[in-house]
Image (tube, helix red, strand yellow):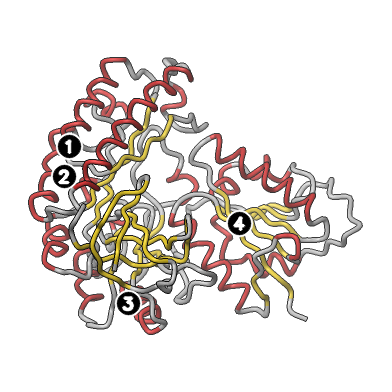
């Protein structure tokens, strides 16, 4: 009888693409996927370490999964496993800790484990981890997403060569690496043949795509090559660093209907002083020019951004500048991240740490601003036609759908997932639009 594999995923879209790769690896070795951790023979926790809270959540879930399934082999992989393997190895009941450097060896590592239900689970887990000094390869995400997802992620890039003062990612993901364009094209065409209507291109720093291979193949050239196949469906570009969002990519999206009109451009702060402390390679004027170019060429584009609140040394004036700058920008939503000190980063050594209560107050103010901007953007589409893709999720007896510009909508529950529909926006329900066919 085939053994059963369960994968729990924390963190970003790149982690979700990595989990798809993990599942596909096990399924290719006679495992079956299960949606119940309690009945799994092997449990893989794909971890995130971008904040202290994400570390804590990984530890809590790992302990809970062991209680719920004392006989399973439990392996923790991902970014937290790469950054602090010893902390995870000390959790009773963890069989192995596998850093990102060894993720491609997960199946072999699991097969080497020999744990019975009677084992006391008190010994230290085996650790499989190295630094990235010799790592140049990249795990390509699989061509077929397992499960109920209607928008599969294709990882085209991993790692980062920037060293922002707050960010741990370069040390846990390694240097920037790009999937060869031929491999990306093959994956996208396989997903196209499988019938998916939208494919998300993701990575850690995808604006640098193609810089790591010879001959180089920048992101706009990759998009052009992908869209040479008329059958390829809508492509959505994951988050981008502002200085890597080239004019060519924006211009291509403005004339190509199969590129989703949605750009998530990471800002982090509206204070030029803080941007320098964060080691971000731009100021607010340069950022504004990039965002305004997007809005000028694609009037209905969804434009989102990330903001870090409470970066060490952030003053009330810095916060005010951020609120004012964001208020002027044509953002349609904001992702707010309270600053979390990551050991080993330059920012963690800055003495002027902002009190938690101040971070909570400033975060709440920015969340209110985000809600206002999102509401104003939604109102632009009332009593207009909107094309949306039906997803697998349902809420309040309606099916959730997603527009190209990242607006969520609700449609009739009888609409099958992975179906494009176009209808009139009749109302707003919470943060969603309601569409009648």
Instruction: Tell me which corner region of the image, top left, top right, bottom left or bottom right, holds residue 283.
Output: top left
Residue nearer the viewer, 316 or 403? 403
Task: Say what secondary structure mark 4 lies in.
Answer: strand
Task: Point out residue 267 in the picture as x, y percentages from the top left corner.
Answer: 27, 38
Q: Residues within 10 Å of mark 3 (few under 14, many from 20)?
A: some
Q: Residues within 10 Å of mark 4 (few under 14, many from 20)?
A: some
Position of residue 38 relative to residue 52, above or below, is: below
Mark closest to the chain's N terminus, 2 or 1: 2
* Camera-side mark, 1 or 3: 1
The dot on residue 291 is 2
Task: Say what secondary structure mark 3 lies in.
Answer: helix
Residues under labels 2 and 1: Cα distance?
A: 8 Å
Residues under labels 1 and 3: Cα distance?
A: 35 Å
State which quarter of the image contains the C terminus: bottom left
Label 2–label 1 contact, CB within 8 A: yes
* Camera-side mark, 2 or 3: 2
Label 3, on which residue?
A: 185
Label 4–label 3 contact, CB within 8 A: no
Image-based side of 134 in relation to 183, left or right: right
The dot on residue 209 is none
Label 1, on which residue?
A: 329
Instruction: Tell me which corner region of the image, top left, top right, bottom left or bottom right, holds residue 28.
Output: bottom right
Residues under labels 4 and 3: Cα distance?
A: 28 Å
Q: Residues within 10 Å of mark 2 (few under 14, many from 20)?
A: many
Mark closest to the chain's N terminus, 1 or 3: 3
């Amino acid at each position: 009888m085939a053994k059963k594999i369960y994968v729990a995923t924390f963190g970003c879209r790149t982690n979700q693409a990595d989990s798809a790769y993990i599942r596909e690896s096990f399924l290719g070795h006679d495992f079956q996927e299960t949606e119940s951790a309690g009945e799994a023979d092997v449990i893989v926790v794909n971890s995130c370490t971008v904040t202290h809270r994400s570390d804590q959540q990984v530890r809590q879930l790992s302990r809970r999964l062991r209680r719920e399934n004392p006989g399973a082999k439990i392996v923790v992989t991902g970014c937290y496993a790469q950054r602090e393997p010893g902390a995870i190895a000390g959790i009773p009941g963890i069989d192995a800790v596998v850093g990102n450097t060894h993720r491609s060896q997960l199946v072999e590592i699991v097969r080497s484990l020999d744990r019975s239900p009677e084992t006391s689970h008190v010994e230290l887990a085996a650790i499989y981890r190295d630094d990235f000094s010799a790592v140049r390869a990249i795990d390509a995400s699989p061509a077929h997403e397992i499960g109920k997802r209607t928008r599969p992620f294709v990882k085209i890039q991993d790692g980062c060569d920037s060293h922002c003062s707050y960010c741990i990612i370069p040390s846990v993901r390694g240097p920037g690496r790009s999937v060869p364009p031929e491999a990306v094209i093959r994956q996208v065409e396989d997903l196209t043949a499988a019938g998916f209507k939208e494919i998300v291109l993701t990575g850690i720093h995808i604006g640098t795509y193609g810089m790591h291979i010879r001959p180089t193949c920048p992101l706009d050239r990759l998009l052009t090559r992908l869209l040479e196949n008329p059958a390829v469906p809508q492509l959505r570009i994951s988050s981008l660093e502002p200085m890597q969002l080239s004019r060519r990519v924006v211009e291509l999206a403005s004339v190509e209907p199969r590129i989703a009109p949605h750009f998530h451009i990471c800002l982090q702060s509206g204070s030029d002083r803080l941007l320098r402390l964060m080691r971000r390679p731009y100021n607010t004027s340069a950022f504004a020019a990039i965002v305004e170019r997007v809005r000028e060429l694609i009037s209905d584009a969804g434009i989102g951004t990330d903001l870090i609140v409470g970066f060490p040394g952030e003053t009330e004036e810095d916060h005010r500048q951020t609120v004012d700058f964001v208020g002027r920008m044509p953002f349609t939503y904001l992702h707010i991240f309270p600053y979390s000190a990551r050991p080993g980063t330059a920012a963690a050594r800055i003495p002027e740490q902002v009190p938690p209560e101040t971070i909570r107050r400033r975060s709440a103010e920015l969340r209110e601003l985000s809600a206002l901007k999102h509401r104003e953007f939604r109102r632009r589409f009332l009593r207009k036609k909107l094309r949306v893709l039906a997803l697998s999720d349902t809420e309040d007896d309606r099916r959730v759908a997603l527009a190209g510009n990242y607006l969520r909508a609700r449609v009739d529950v009888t609409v099958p997932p992975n179906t494009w529909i176009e209808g009139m926006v009749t109302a707003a329900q919470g943060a969603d639009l309601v569409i009648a066919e």
